[in-house]
Amino acid sequence: MDDRWIAERMSRIDASGIRKAFEMAKAMKNPINFSIGLPDFDVADPVKEAAYEAIRAGRNQYSVTQGVPELRSKIQEAVDATFHHADRQVMVTSGTAGGLLLAVSAVVDPGDEVIVFDPYFVMYNHQVTLVGGKTVLIDTYPDFRIRAEDVAQAITPKTKAVIVNSPVNPTGVVATAEEMQKLALLCKEKNVLLISDEVYRAFCFDRPFSTPAEWNEDVLVVDAFSKSYGMTGWRLGFAHGPTRLIQEMAKLQQFSFVCAPTPFQHAGVKALDQDLTPHVEAYRRKRDLVVAALSEGYDLPYPEGAFYAFPRAPWGTASEFVAEAIRRELLIIPGNVFSRRDTHFRISYAVGDDTLKRGLEVLRDLARHCER
Ligand code: PLP
């Protein structure tokens, strides 16, 4: 096939480093897989039943683009009860990723800048590139806190949006209310759209979750059922924000995803009734095990949420360290997949206890490796 058929911008989009680890795991006999951000619990039975029931009842056609009314209004009620904004509308999307792509496509013109905190969830950079925008990275090492002052300095006349994510993939850091408030107010003052990726909102272990939409009614929130309800493959998410923006996103959804999978939208109504506490408590306990195991030999920014930790590699570059870990069948992700730097590595501790113990043992041994 002629290379000319492939768009030039595709050369600026790398295949996902996380997917590569996923493929590698398939080729290993008994890998310890700390590489992928998947909850290790399954969809709750009543939610599965609601999906089977929707399929049996023939709810298999396209839905209206903005989402089936039962689901949309249930999410809208919760959003209205939280924010009391005069103009905040909900739409159902194909996961957080789908909502984000609609948002970025709706607001970023070629040459526009989008501010992203480094380290960042890989998709942000690629989606911005896809629509011809430019990602401007703000380095948050070594504590991974977000500082509105740094954002103020990075804003230029070309800045269209800031993307913030808390709890953060890959660091597990959770923004404080003060940090979010400052960022929200700055974006309001500078007339820049703030997009808040809240897909790990349920997993905050040490402080309550803070959303910037509390202080800025123009914030666009993207969220999903993926992580909180173990439904990553169902592609069910939602976005809420000012009506004008949601309308543009819905217009784009008509010509792209069309709608989120209809039977799963019906089951999503049931999902919203599920109690997430047992899963959150299970991950809090796993987080504590990770922190205890890595307290010696690792510099670990305290992971307060999601199900990730981002320790500094105790020797070598993160890529060299990860290569050694993989030789020992432990799959972890080098920091340069998420960052301009290659100093840290990400572990996902959303795994069974036995796997967690095995992996932490390998990490303890790898830290000792540096003392030899
Ligand atoms: N945002 C962040 C920060 C993520 O880590 C992920 C998935 O790993 C997504 C969005 C994508 O979520 P979804 O599966 O809902 O599209």
Image: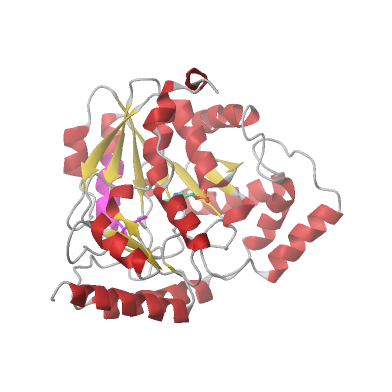
Residue 174, x across and y down, in percent: 32, 60
In the image, residue 86 above or below residue 334: above
In the image, residue 136 above or below residue 198: above
> Residue at the location (37% across, 75% down)?
359
The C terminus lies in which quarter of the figure?
A: bottom left
In the image, residue 132 above or below residue 222: above
In-front residue for pair 301/50: 301
Query: How many marks do you count on the picture?
Result: 0
Quarter of the rendering containing residue 260: top right
Residue 319, x across and y down, in percent: 27, 55
Residue 41 painted magenta = no
Direction from residue 114 to residue 98 in the image, left or right: right
> Residue at the location (28% across, 53% down)?
335
Look at the image and give the residue range highlighted in magenta. Answer: 169-185
Whether residue 17 is visible: yes
Spot the residue most to the right: 57
